[in-house]
């Protein structure tokens, strides 16, 4: 006979104590992966962070091929016309720490979510646990898809637009290292989080706080909100905002389907 306490029989302080251990293990995983990223500086910076700055980056080669395919070379170029500068004594070291922490958080995301799910799962009913199978897999896949979309689509377009934009030929673009890295990391993380929309809708539908009818009713409001979010995380050009908006709108439609399925299952059980 199992004498271990269940989640339902635990006191509030015991819940907090267990949550603390989940958070500690998650934090430890992030720190460990951050240390690995810190020790692999050349890979993280030269190949990943500064990769979109190179003219032979995968995205640029694809657009060049596409441009050549339709009969032109308007999207082909040989260099990115700006330099990166460090303006502070500790700037490079601080950016090394920050980028390592962001990389650690991205790599550890599946484990962190698994720890959160371990804490939440025992409080669910048996039918809810069965219907939630695969949630870790889909959450991880959506997050990674968002990160890859931001890194290979939004970041290169942002670099090309902002890095080459000039108000006059008299002005030379010399970008501060902090500004460049902040843009790359913020866009990559933001798109990864935005792609979690179906998962968020799934859990809120489980709680009865969202329904497909409600999502349809406020579709226009959601579109406005998505446009505002895309304007915040992308440079001020229409192409980048559309590229962010389109997949999120698709995810919103998928979220409606997810919510409809949850509501139907709850109605069938009642």
Image (tube, grey):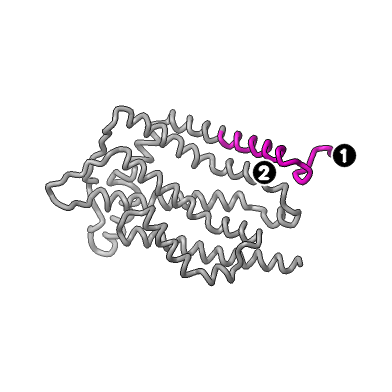
Q: Position of residue 49 (x, y in %)?
A: 36, 40
Image quadrant where residue 201 sits: bottom right
Mark 1 to mark 2: distance in Å?
23 Å
At horizontal 70% and vertical 65% (from top left) the residue drawn is: 265
Q: Position of residue 82 (x, y in %)?
A: 22, 43
* Residue 10: in magenta span: yes
Range drawn in magenta: 1-27
Horizontally, residue 183 falls left or right of residue 6, namely: left
The label number, if any, that marks residue 119 in the structure image: 2
Q: Are marks 1 and 2 in contact (CB under 8 Å)?
A: no
Describe the element under mark 1 as helix, strand or loop.
loop
Quadrant (top left/top right/bottom left/bottom right) for the N terminus: top right
Q: Of residues 106 and 73, which is closer to you in this image?
A: 106
The label number, if any, that marks residue 1 in the structure image: 1
Q: Position of residue 63 (x, y in %)?
A: 31, 56
Q: Of residues 251 and 67, which is closer to you in this image?
A: 251
At horizontal 32% and vertical 54% (from top left) the residue drawn is: 235
Describe the element under mark 2 as helix, strand or loop.
helix
Question: 92 above or below 172?
Answer: above
């Amino acid at each position: 006979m199992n004498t271990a306490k269940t989640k339902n029989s635990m006191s509030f302080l015991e819940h907090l104590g267990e949550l603390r251990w989940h958070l500690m293990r998650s934090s430890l995983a992030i720190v460990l992966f951050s240390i690995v990223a810190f020790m692999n500086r050349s890979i993280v910076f030269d190949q990943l962070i500064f990769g979109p700055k190179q003219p032979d980056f995968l995205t640029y080669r694809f657009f060049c091929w596409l441009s050549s395919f339709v009969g032109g070379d308007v999207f082909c170029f040989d260099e990115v016309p700006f330099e990166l500068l460090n303006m502070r004594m500790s700037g490079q070291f601080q950016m090394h720490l920050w980028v390592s922490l962001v990389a650690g958080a991205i790599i550890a995301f599946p484990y962190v979510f698994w720890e959160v799910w371990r804490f939440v799962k025992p409080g669910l009913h048996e039918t809810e646990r069965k219907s939630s199978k695969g949630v870790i897999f889909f959450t991880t896949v959506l997050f990674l898809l968002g990160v890859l979309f931001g890194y290979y689509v939004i970041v290169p377009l942002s670099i090309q637009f902002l890095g080459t934009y000039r108000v006059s030929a008299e002005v030379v673009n010399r970008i501060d290292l902090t500004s460049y890295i902040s843009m790359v990391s913020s866009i990559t993380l933001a798109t990864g989080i935005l792609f979690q929309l179906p998962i968020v809708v799934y859990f809120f539908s489980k709680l009865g706080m969202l329904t497909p009818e409600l999502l349809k009713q406020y579709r226009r409001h959601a579109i406005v909100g998505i446009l505002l979010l895309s304007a915040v995380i992308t440079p001020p050009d229409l192409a980048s905002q559309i590229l962010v908006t389109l997949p999120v709108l698709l995810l919103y439609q998928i979220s409606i389907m997810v919510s409809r399925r949850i509501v139907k299952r709850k109605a069938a059980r009642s």
